[in-house]
Amino acid sequence: MDTISYDNCTICPRRCGADRTKTPGFCGATDRIKVARAALHMWEEPCLSGERGAGTVFFSGCQLGCVYCQNRAISHGEAGAEITRERLVEIFFELAEKGAHNIDLVTPDCYIPDVARAIREAKDNGLALPLVCNCSGYETVEAIKTLGGLIDVWMPDLKYLDEDIAQKYSAAPDYPEVAKAAVDAMVVLRPECVFDEDGMMIKGVLVRHLLLPGCLEDSRNALKYLYSRYGNGIWYSIMSQYTPPDGMERPLDRRVTSREYDALIDFACGLGIENAFIQEGGAAEESFIPQFDCEGVIPRHTDG
């Protein structure tokens, strides 16, 4: 765990080398943990949200910076409040007290050294909920190993297999190879998907893939790659919820059509994918984006 740190930062594949004790890195984060929301969340996959909600902790900052990002308020490191590692541990327990099925760490990548320590401290003090790492897939194997056996459920994206698309939309032509290695490392750590009696995932790997407009062929290739490598040993979440931010150029200036999404689902079925979550029509019209207003982040002190 001590091999990665905030000074001369190489935590993510960008390896920007920033001294984050003095200035933000490429990700927009400093060496202070920054969280934009900590609350029950009902819009994760059913095996994570269940009936009571996932205990999501939304971290600020992102090493990828996709042009179409739906969470740009936090991905740019703007929204949120700085907290201590001790406060992060408290947040875990507060979410547990609210009935969360799990602790769902959303893009914790920028703060992995502190997150790993916080999880250990929480577990040492009796936290028994599964820990979920909800990430972009653009992670180093070293960072994944830092979290090691602390994470029960890995939920990475596999956004692209085409280097040109990865460069165009995320300025990361190495994304395909980095993400492949990352998912491999996660499967090594959690090779079996395990569910409890209520159908909640408590161990395993669930890979998300968002279909983008005009990228159907790359999406087919992504699912084909995953299935050829892991079969139904992992779970898949095939999403259609892309909503274009203002100012997007073609083809990202529109939503995915039903015809495109149906074609991808038919392809997935033809491959033999059985363990998958899919989205019903109209998903893109729903709001999956919460308010990043620091709910649950700042402790509320009461008199007496």
Image: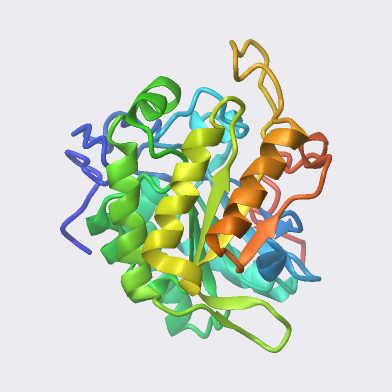
Q: Horizontal placement of 51 versus 300: left or right?
A: right
Task: Name the foreground residue: 15 vs 281.
Answer: 281
Q: Please indicate, yes or no, whether residue 58 appears anywhere in the rendered image.
A: yes
Looking at this rendering, what residue extends furthest in the bottom direction?
197
Q: Is residue 255 above or below residue 277?
A: above
* Residue at position x 72%, y 57% in the image: 41
Q: Position of residue 94 (x, y in %)?
A: 66, 68
Vertical placement of residue 125 versus 164, above or below: below
Q: Quadrant of residue 138?
A: top left
Q: Residue at x 49, y 28 (%)?
A: 76
In-image side of 295 versus 135 (left or right): right
User: Looking at the rendering, in which quadrant would you find the C terminus?
Assistant: bottom right
Residue occupying the point 31% across, 72% down: 188
Q: State whether residue 293 appears in this view.
A: no
Q: For this rendering, which residue is in front, 42 or 111? A: 42
x and y percentages locating residue 291 in the rendered image: 73, 39
Above or below for 174 versus 203: above
- If the image is split into quadrants, where does the N terminus sit? bottom left
Residue 152: image x %, image y %?
A: 47, 74
Measured as percent of width and height from the top left, residue 218 is found at: 47, 36
Q: Residue furthest front?
A: 270
User: Looking at the image, which is closer to me, 162 or 264?
Assistant: 264
Q: Which residue does the image show at 32% across and 51% down from the upper left?
A: 180
11 or 80: nearer the viewer: 11
Residue 48 sits in which quadrant? bottom right
Residue 241 quadrant = top right
